[in-house]
Image (tube, helix red, strand yellow):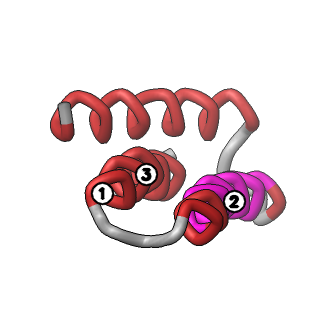
Amino acid sequence: SGHASTAAVFAPLTARNLQRVDVPPALRTTLGIGAAAMTAGTARARIEAGWHHPSDVLVGIAIGNFMGAFFTD
């Protein structure tokens, strides 16, 4: 799923960028959880809409997470 993959790219990017920004730890944690929740919500919406099977979005999330971590690190 391209939508799940795109959403999954932004979760590790958000987490890594938040580590470099001077914000309170509670806010950093909340925003990181929010980014992960947006990824999960996007994946769930694609399944509920009938556009993809769960395996499609899981592979999309795996690819997006890998690409986000790879290009950030």
What residue is drawn where x is 62% and y is 53%? 36
**Which of the two marks, 2 or 1, is nearer to us in this view?**
1
- Disc 3/disc 2 C-alpha distance (Å): 13 Å
Q: Is residue 40 at least partly visible in the picture?
A: yes
In the picture, residue 46 is in which quadrant?
bottom right
Image marks 1 and 3: residues in contact by CB distance under 8 Å: yes
In reply to whether residue 48 is colored magenta, the answer given is no
- Disc 1/disc 3 C-alpha distance (Å): 6 Å
Q: Secondary structure at mark 1?
A: helix
Q: Is residue 2 at least partly visible in the picture?
A: no
Frontmost residue, 25 versus 31: 25
Q: Which residue is mark 2?
A: 37
Q: Residues within 10 Å of mark 3 (few under 14, many from 20)?
A: some
Q: Which residue is mark 1?
A: 17
Q: Secondary structure at mark 3?
A: helix
**In the picture, which quadrant includes the C terminus?**
top left
**Which of the two marks, 3 or 2, is nearer to us in this view?**
3
Label placed on residue 9:
none
In the picture, residue 21 is in which quadrant?
bottom left
In reply to whether residue 39 is colored magenta, the answer given is yes
What residue is drawn where x is 41% and y is 45%? 12
What residue is drawn where x is 66% and y is 57%? 33
- Disc 2/disc 1 C-alpha distance (Å): 17 Å
Frontmost residue, 49 versus 43: 43
What are the residue bounds of the magenta stretch?
A: 31-47
Amino acid at the residue labelled 1: Asn
